[in-house]
Amino acid sequence: MTRNLRTPLLVAFVAALFLLEGLTDVAFFAGSWNSSLSILNMALISAIMALGVNLQWGFAGLFNIGVMGFVALGGLAAVLVSMPPTEGAWAAGGTGILLGLVLGGATIIAAVLVQMKLPSGRLRMAVTLAVLIAGFMIYRRVFDPAVVAIEAINPASSGNIGGLNLPVLLAWPVGGLLAAGAAWVIGKTALGLRSDYLAIATLGIAEIIIAVMKNEDWLARGVKNVIGVPRPAPFVPYEVNLQSDPAFLARVAEWGFNPVLASTIYVKLAYGVLFTLVLLILLWLAQKALSSPWGRMMRAIRDNEVAAEAMGKDVKNRHLQIFILGSAICGIAGAMMTTLDGQLTPGTYQPLRFTFLVWVMVIVGGSGNNFGAVLGAFLIWFLWNKVEPMGQWILEIVTAGLDDTSVLKAYLFDLVAHMRLLTMGVVLLLVLRFSPRGLLPER
C-alpha cells in the first residue's frame, strides 16, 4: 500500500471507531456519544503527550521513560495556578516555605561552586559535605515549622497552601514551564549518560516527583487529593448552569434532546474544541521545527552523533534543548488532563499509563513522524478503553454453550480484566513485525 493511500485509510479507520462508539446499537461497541467524546478528549491529551515524546525520541533519539513525572508537574501547575489560596495559609507559613526553598536552592548552588572552585581531593569532599549538611539543617529548621503550620489549617478539607486563583487556561503554559524547568535540571545532570542510563535516571526522577507530590501535603494535599479544579471559563460551562439557562433549554427542546444529556455532550464538545486547538498549534510548530534547518540538524545528530560533532555541532546542548521542549509539551498535556478531570490525584500517576502507553502510541504510530504519533495516540487510547468490553463480548459468544456454574467460564471471564495488557502487547508485536517503523513511518 502506498503512503499516499495508507494515511487517509488509517485516519478514516480511527475516525470510524469513534463514530461507531457513539452508536449504541452496534455490536460490542455498546457505547454512547458521551463515552465516545470522553475517549476522544483523553485521546487528544494523549496525542499531545505522544507529540512531546516523539520530539525527544523521533527527532533526537533520547530515551526518556520519565514522562509520568513531567505530566504530574503539569497537573500540579493547574492546582497552584487556578485554585484559590487557603485562608490563613500564607500568614501561617508562606514566608517560611519560600525562605526554606530559597535556602535549599542556595545550599545546592554553594555545593556546586565548591566542586567547581576547589581542586579534587579530600579537602573538596570535606567542604562539600560540610556545606550540604549545614545547609540541610538550616533548611529543615526553617521549612519544617512552616509546613506544620500550613498542614494544621483545616486538614480535612484543605491543609495546603492553595493556589493563585487565576484562570485555569494560564495553568496550561505554566505547566509547560514547570516541566521545562525540571527537564533543564534533569538534562544538565543526566544527558551526558548513555541512553540506557538516561532511561533509568529519568524513570527514577519521575518516581521522586510523584513521591514528593504524594507526601508533601502542604503543596497539593498529597494523597488526600485536590478536587474542584475550575473549568476554563467562559469556554466550558458547568452542566448545572446549562440546565438552568432558558436559552439553552429552548434550543434543546427545539431539537428534541434531553437537557441533561445535551448539557454533558455540550461540555465534552467544548473541551474537545479547546484540546483540538492546542494540539493543532503544537502539531504545526512541531512540523515547522521538523522541516527547519534545526530539525534537520537534530535528525543528523540522532543518526550519527560522532559525525555531527565532527561537523561542529554542540550535541549535548542540542539534546538539552529538545529534552526541555518535549518535556514542556508533556507538562502542558498534564495541566490539560487535570483541568478535564477537575481534580489532582497523585496516586493515579502510574508508569504503565503515563510512560509505557505513551511510548506504545509513538512506536505504533511511527516515531519521527508527528502525524504518526498523533494517529497512534488516538488508536491506542481507543483500544485501551474498549478492549475489555470487547473481550467480554467475545467471551459471551464463545462460552454461550457453557453453564453459568462452569468453572472454565468463570475462569475465562476473570481473565477479561487483563485484556488491556494483552492487547497492547499483541498490537505492539504485530506492528513491529509487519511495519517496524510504525503505521505512518518517517519519510
Image: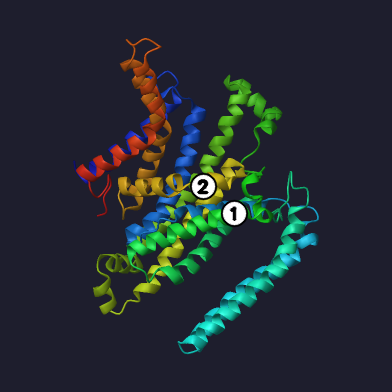
Residue linked to disc 1:
213
**In front of the other: 59 or 65:** 65
Residue 44 position within the rendered picture, expressed as x and y whole percent measured from the top left: 46, 43
Q: Mark 2: which amino acid?
A: Tyr
Q: Is residue 412 left or right of residue 242?
A: left
Task: From the top left corner, tell me how far across and down residue 382 is, in percent.
Answer: 40, 35
In the image: residue 429, left or right of residue 85: left
Q: Is residue 149 above or below residue 362?
A: below
* Picture residue at 71% right of the left edge, 63% below the top: 144
The relative height of residue 297 versus residue 149 in the rendered view (above or below) is: below
- Quick one: label 2 or label 1, which is nearer the N terminus? 1
| Image position, residue 136 (x, y; %) | 63, 72
Q: Which residue does the image show at 38% across and 60% down from the upper left?
A: 199
Q: Which residue is mark 2?
A: 349
**Residue 433 in view, yes or no:** yes
Nearest the eye: 148 or 202: 148
* Nearer to us in this view, 127 or 212: 127
**Which residue appears at 67% of the width and 53% of the height?**
217
Image quadrant for the N terminus?
A: top left
Helix, strand or loop under label 2 = loop
Residue type at tag 1: Met
| 104 or 130, nearer to the observer | 130
* Camera sees residue 225: no
Q: Are marks 2 and 1 in contact (CB under 8 Å)?
A: yes
Q: Residue 411, percent across and down? A: 37, 22
Is residue 72 positioned above or below 348 on the image? below
- Badge 1 local density, few (<14 within 10 Å), some, or many (20+)? many
The correct choice, above or below, for 93 with respect to 115 in the image is above
